[in-house]
Amino acid sequence: MSHVYACRHPKTSLAFDTTWIAAIFASQAFDTEQAYWLYESLMDRLAGDLKPIAIRVTSVVLPQLLAQQDQQLHADLSRKGFDSASYGALLVSWLPSIFASALPFPTVLRLMDLLILEGPLLLLRAALAILLVMSKRLISAESKEDILRLLLQPSADELVSPESLVKVMAKISLSDKVVEGLKTKALASLANQRRN
């Protein structure tokens, strides 16, 4: 599916492998054509958010949003050296797979449903929710490497179940306007860093 999408949309370059997303649609008993059109529809909505620069910008915005949601967790992660590069490594794994690289399949399916319904802002809400749901484990981690390992391979227990994740996500209020403002500032900051 991802190859067909690339052929149909040669000017849309997805820098990351999105076969996870295609596999999810194909696994849900859709016929091939139906699965492809769902994949194309989602990729059309997400293509801008899956580009390397967009993921880099999101790696700057995510810790800012985390600080608004849980100052203690944000401070603890920062103290352990979990910086925007660490968030970037995390997001490069999470976003192109719609979290399938890290979460149990039932949770990924629930996120996929919500993503189709709500759009790209859901990716940020889900990333924040995972951080919040796992906060006790993250705070007990000793290093940024331990934090990254926990987040890239969380256990399949109740902490990342569809129900617990959606419950936390429901409490996270993000507006497109606020997020776009943060992304614009982050992009300008990244551009200034490149010039210097």
Image (cartoon, helix red, strand yellow):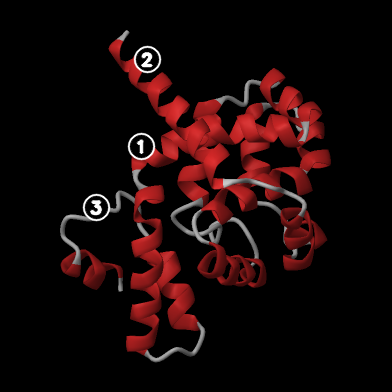
Decide which of 174, 75 is in the foreground and name it.
174
Count residues near mark 1 (Cα–Cα under 10 Å), then give few for <14, some for 14-19, many for 20+.
Answer: some
Mark 2 near mark 1, Cβ–Cβ under 8 Å? no
On the rendered structure, is 158 left or right of 53? right
Q: Which mark is residue 13?
A: 3
**Amino acid at dot 3:** Ser
- Secondary structure beneath label 3: loop
Which of the image's four quarters has the N terminus? bottom left
Residue 37 occupies quadrant: bottom left
> Residue 139, percent across and down?
80, 32
For the point 35% across and 50% down, the residue is 48
Determine the image quadrant of residue 61: top right
**Which label number is shown at residue 153?**
none
Q: Earlier in the sequence, mark 1 or mark 3?
A: 3
The residue at the point 41 percent across, 49 percent down is 49
- Amino acid type at image mark 2: Gln
Extreme-front residue of the structure: 177
Of mark 2 and mark 1, the one earlier in the sequence is: 1
The circle drawn on residue 53 is 1
Q: Amino acid at mark 1?
A: Ile
Mark 2 vs mark 1, CA separation in Å: 14 Å
Q: Is residue 182 above or below residue 33?
A: above
Helix, strand or loop for disc 2: helix
Cα–Cα gap, marks 1 and 3: 12 Å
Task: Residue at 16% x, 67% y: name it.
Answer: 7
Picture coordinates of residue 152, whole percent (x, y)? 60, 47
One can see residue 193 in this view: yes
Task: Spot the residue most to the top.
Answer: 196
Decide which of tag 2 and tag 3 comes sooner along the chain: 3
| Res 160 seen here | no
Which residue carries the number 2 mark? 193
